[in-house]
Image (tube, rainbow, N blue to C red):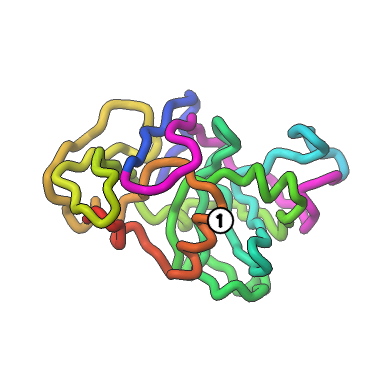
């Protein structure tokens, strides 16, 4: 669905959602190799990523502990500025899941998230590596608005291709089409916010400004 994009580009801010970082840079990579489950600290033959941590890679299925609950994400983009990755986050009630139950047929949503804090606190476990992440992309687009007031409906939206988020917007519209309603919310989110959205079974068409 999304072809590799070699250059780094800026992810436009999404003012309508509370985010930790308003701007990140974004890039894609090719299919990764298989690997077994391990902690994201002190793995053998791992590339260093500060403080003994390694860099998560495209295709990684990660288990992340947050607030005593467990959440599962697939990494869809390489590490970008501020430690953010575009992810597929599985809807879950916070219970532990078997790898075999986590497939592209499961419900969930795409989101850009900062994984640095849970990595530093050793709350991230790599469970599996998917060879093909294309089925985990739920949209080819990202949407943003200048509206930031809670609960206020946006009068204007900007739509970007998800593989060229730092480029020119491809649409500037007052009302979202059904396809654009499902576009990923732009911005880089702290993982505690992602966890809350998972528990609420959030999808981008539920954006409060629509």
Give the quadrant of residue 15.
Answer: top left
Nearest to the observer: residue 123 or residue 55? 123
Q: Is residue 95 left or right of residue 155?
A: right
Q: Main secondary structure of the magenta part?
A: loop
Could you say where residue 47 lies in the image, as x and y percent from the top left? 78, 34
- 92 or 68: nearer the eye? 68
Vertical comparison of 145 with 139: above or below = above
Q: Which residue extends farthest top?
A: 7
Q: Which quadrant would the C terminus be assigned to in this image? A: bottom left
Residue at the extreme front of the image, as rendered: 149
Percent position of residue 150, x then y: 29, 53
**Residue 46 x %, y %:** 81, 39
Q: Residue at x 71, y 54 (%)?
A: 124
Q: Residue at x 25, y 38 (%)?
A: 146
Residue 12 location, quadrant: top left
In the image, what residue occupies the spot 60% across and 64% down? 71
Res 13 quadrant in image: top left
Residue 122 in picture, x, y percent from top left = 77, 51
Residue carrying label 1: 192
Foreground pick, 64 / 44: 64
Q: In the depicted view, which residue is nearer to us: 138 or 90? A: 90
Magenta stretch in the rendered image? 16-43
How many C-alpha atoms fall within 10 Å of the one at disc 1: few (<14), some, or many (≥20)?
Answer: some
| Image side of residue 174 versus residue 210, left or right | left
Local SS, label 1: helix
Give the tally of numbered discs. Answer: 1
Magenta stretch containing residue 112, yes or no? no
């Amino acid at each position: 669905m999304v072809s590799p994009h070699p250059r780094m580009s800026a992810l436009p801010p999404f003012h309508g959602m509370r985010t930790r970082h308003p701007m990140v840079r974004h890039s894609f990579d090719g299919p990764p190799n298989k690997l077994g489950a391990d902690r994201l600290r002190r793995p053998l033959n791992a590339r260093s990523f500060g403080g003994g941590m390694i860099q998560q890679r495209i295709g990684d299925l990660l288990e992340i502990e947050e607030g005593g609950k467990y959440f599962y994400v697939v990494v869809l983009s390489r590490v970008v500025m501020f430690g953010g990755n575009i992810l597929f986050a599985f809807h879950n009630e916070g219970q532990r899941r078997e790898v075999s139950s986590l497939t592209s047929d499961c419900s969930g949503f795409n989101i850009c998230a900062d994984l640095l804090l849970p990595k530093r606190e050793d709350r991230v476990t790599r469970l599996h590596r998917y060879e093909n992440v294309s089925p985990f992309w739920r949209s080819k687009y990202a949407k943003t608005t200048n509206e930031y007031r809670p609960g206020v409906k946006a009068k204007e939206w900007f739509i970007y291709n998800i593989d060229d988020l730092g480029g020119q917007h491809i649409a500037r519209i007052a009302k979202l089409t059904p396809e654009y309603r499902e576009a990923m919310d732009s911005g880089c989110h702290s993982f505690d916010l992602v966890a809350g959205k998972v528990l609420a079974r959030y999808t981008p068409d539920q954006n409060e400004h629509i």
